Amino acid sequence: MGTLFVVAMLTGCTLGPDFHSPEPPGVTTYLPNDRTTVSAVGAGVPGQRMTYGGDIPDRWWELLRSRHLNGLIEDGIIRNAELEAAEAAVRVAQANALAQRGALFPQVLANFNASRQKNPSQSLATNAASGANLYSLHTAQVSVNYVPDVFGGTRRLIETADALVEVQAFQREGIYLTLAANIALAAIQEASLRGQLAATRRLITLQTQLLGILNQQNERGQIALPDVVAQETAVAQAKLLLPPIEKQLAQQRDLIAFLTGHFPSEEVAATFQLQSFQLPRKLPLSVPADLVRQRPDVRVAEANLRAVNAQIGVAIANRLPQITLTANAGSTATAISQLFTPGTGFWMIAGNVAQTVFDAGTLENKQRAAEEAMTQAAALYRSTVLTAFQNVADTLRALQADARAVSAAIAAERSAARYIGLVQRQVEQGQVSIPVLLNAQQAYLQTSLALVQAEASRLADTVALFQALGGGWWNRPETPAQPPAPPIETLQ
């Protein structure tokens, strides 16, 4: 039996394919025409230059230069319930991985039994050495059970558990990144809504001033009453725009409270205007080969691939003979004081080898299922990688379009402001018709809102770029992306 134990330990192998991380894609650019500068045409509109191969800081949101945003994101990281749950899930997976490692070692059980019994005096013989029919029996023993990992099935299960730790760790990083990005986007959207409110209120103020002028002209008989009523209608229509924007702003504040772990009734102190942010002039752009190592969703897909790959080895090992070694030793006596005295000891060593002879193809089909699951996981990994590259490419194109949109919006807003200024002077002099005035007012409102939205979109797409590139989690010192347990080889 000792020989069998030694042979099992020395000749153990690990069946099934060993996992190797997929090679990064061979592409070297994200766009057909690689552009490292996202520039804008127009005076006063700064461009953004991509630092190709630049690293993403772990606190990337600080590049927006908003002290209130920094505090808001820090608060959200501390208080957000979803992130807290994700961190707990990592600890669960780590504990399960450590528990799985215990299968490599023998299981040792110690037990003590005590009984008091009486045998019939005529029909049965007593077990007591004294011949008494009434006696006590005390037994203390240690039992050892061991299943040697001859074919590596247990080690493949450990590999699966370690991979699941990585899955949970990178899912946690994905939630961390999404949370930070969502808070930043929520703050930018709040700033956009406040900008839209300000633009609409500026127009209402201007319209009200013009309405006063038209009323005076009507009283002097210079214009007809319908012209005054038309301007009154325009003022009322502009005021109708305020409640929907105010509702969106209130709901946006509720969203910020939720993301930072507060109840809606707990007012978030920080408020945001577009002027609260500074657009980063230089943006780091990871090389494509690094993207697959940085994106949490790609790393989750890779860890799932590793877990599924290990299951093939488990399925193969289950089809081979299963070896079990058992042993126990102890002492039994009619009195506790006599335990472990000469003549009371006993021991047993046993081994068992079992091989499934017929199972109607159950184990074979389980192996086939594991192999097909590997094919499925590989396809999902490739799809995740393609999605990651699409996200980066879409964001780069959005930033290029944003720069042009901001430039065009600035020019349009300036032109509309000059136009409505000219129209206002003509109204004061009674030289313009009401339709021209109404068109000028509408153009001023539309261009003002378009400029606010274009500036907000540029900030939002800058945040989206950091998110698409992985968010810099690898630069955060406390990131536990790997399980803390020692390598399997040290436990063999």
Image (cartoon, rainbow, N blue to C red):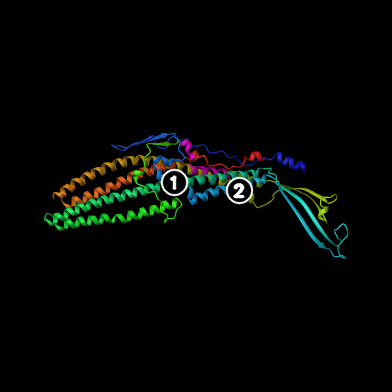
Checking the image for residue 73, the label placed there is 1
First of labels 1, 2 by sequence position = 1
Checking the image for residue 33, the label placed there is none
Q: Nearer the viewer, residue 428 or 67?
A: 67
Amino acid type, residue under disc 1 in the picture: Ile
Q: Is residue 230 above or below residue 453?
A: below
Q: Is residue 291 magenta?
A: yes
Near mark 2 (Cα within 10 A), the count class, few <14, some 14-19 or many ≥20, is some
Q: Position of residue 390 (x, y in %)?
A: 43, 42
Q: Nearer the viewer, residue 213 or 284?
A: 213
Left or right, 336 with respect to 414, comes to right
Q: Position of residue 420 (x, y in %)?
A: 21, 47
Q: Is residue 299 magenta?
A: yes
From which residue to which does the magenta span run? 288-307
Q: Nearer the viewer, residue 384 or 399?
A: 399
Near mark 1 (Cα within 10 A), the count class, few <14, some 14-19 or many ≥20, is many
Please tell me in which quadrant of the rendered image residue 251 appears: bottom left
Q: Is residue 272 above or below residue 265?
A: above
Instruction: Confirm whether residue 315 shows in the render.
Output: no
Which residue corresponds to the image point at 68% horizontal and 46% vertical from the top-left?
A: 320
Instruction: Confirm whether residue 295 shows in the render.
Output: yes
Q: Which residue is mark 2?
A: 96
Q: Main secondary structure of the magenta part?
A: helix
Q: How many marks?
A: 2
The residues tagged by marks 1 and 2 sit, at their Cα atoms, a distance apart of 31 Å
Indicate the secondary structure of the residue bearing disc 2: helix
Q: Position of residue 45 (x, y in %)?
A: 31, 38
Please tell me in which quadrant of the rendered image residue 218 appears: bottom left
Left or right, 487 with respect to 73, comes to right
Amino acid type, residue under disc 2 in the picture: Asn
